[in-house]
Amino acid sequence: MPGPIVRDYKNGSIVYFEKDKTEDIYVLQKGRVVLTYTSIHGTEIKEDVKIGEFFGVKSSIGKYPREETAQVIGNATILVFKSQEFEKFVSDKPHLIIKMLKVFSSQLRSVHKQTREVLGQGESKSPAFELMNVAEVFHRNSQLDHAGYAYRKYLETYPSGFYEERAKNLLELTKQGEAYPISIPELLYRNESPAKNQSEMNEMLHTMAHTKSESAVDPNSLQARYDKGTIFLNAGKIKEAIQIFQEVSSVPEVKSQDEEQIKENSLFYLGKAQFKGSDFGGAVQTFSTYLKKFPTGHLTKENLYHLAIVHEELGEKDKAKQFFQRVIKLPPFDDSLSEDSKSRLEYEG
């Protein structure tokens, strides 16, 4: 059996994306790699991989999609094992197995602690917030029936409550069998009680609407509109998603680099929405516009892949082949986009 291989990655390269289905296991030899994932609370967490440390082990051994995105900061040298190679490598090194078990045990304790907190067994929160939090925990863990039940209970208990629109959108996703949207903003804490009557609730909402809060999300902000577009897209509301992504991606001026990133993302997801709506001509135009505006954007590889898929749908095999070839030339070279592109090229001959 061949041994592991050494790969050199450039600054900004993605070793693997969250939800990729590759089974390689990695060891950081030199440089810096950051793992980014979403906690059970829904917040984004970043962790540095230490020199000599394995990563990508759990998903490889368990044969399930990656739980995090691994990105190179600066340049890095990484040792890459196939799963069978790794098993053989550690079979006679019990100290490595014990070390990994300790890491996994610590992670499980952390998850258990977070679960107790969101289920109200830790820090006390408002009942409305806890109910939404529990619903979203179920949703993030693909327990759609439980999530749907909790969303419905929130809507029944807190009619016109602070999280009403969020609960309705997420409930619609569970009905469609859709996963929890990774781009949705973090659930904001609000202390609310069941309304005694509609006028009381209206008064509360009016007060909230005119109260400034540093943690409040402006529903008209670029981020909020973009997030709503992604929810519509995941819920199959294609026309609504297209309208929002068109508006956000064409905003003439932005106030920050984050908003510029939102514009870039919106242009890409506009193409995806057009493709889902069978507007293949519009999708080709949008994806091509993305490549012109953001030739080195962080979604360039995925954009090229979708261009290839659209040309396949249009029966333009030669153009599709050109874009699939461009996909496999971009790092990372062993992710799901590269593997699928290679398979399609082999199938077409």
Image: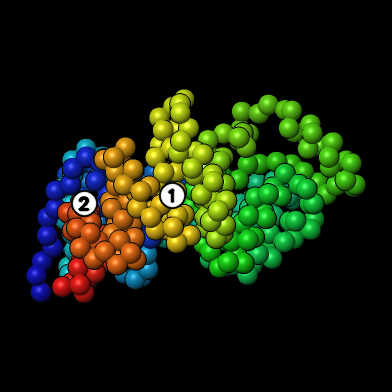
Query: Which amino acid type is shown beneath numbered disc 2?
Result: Pro
Given residues 57 and 113, the one toward you in this image is: 57
The numbered disc on residue 331 is 2
Q: Earlier in the sequence, mark 2 or mark 1?
A: 1
Q: Residue at image x 23%, y 56%?
A: 323
The numbered disc on residue 269 is 1
Q: Residue at image x 41%, y 52%?
A: 282
Percent position of residue 347, x then y: 21, 74
Q: Secondary structure at mark 2?
A: loop
Percent position of residue 80, x then y: 18, 59
Q: Quadrant of residue 145?
A: bottom right
Given residues 244 and 27, the one toward you in this image is: 244
Query: Which amino acid type is shown beneath numbered disc 1?
Result: Tyr
Circle nearer the viewer, 2 or 1: 1
Q: Secondary structure at mark 1?
A: helix
Question: Can residue 86 be seen in the rendering of this structure?
Answer: no
Relative to 239, 157 lies left or right: right
Given residues 309 and 62, the one toward you in this image is: 309
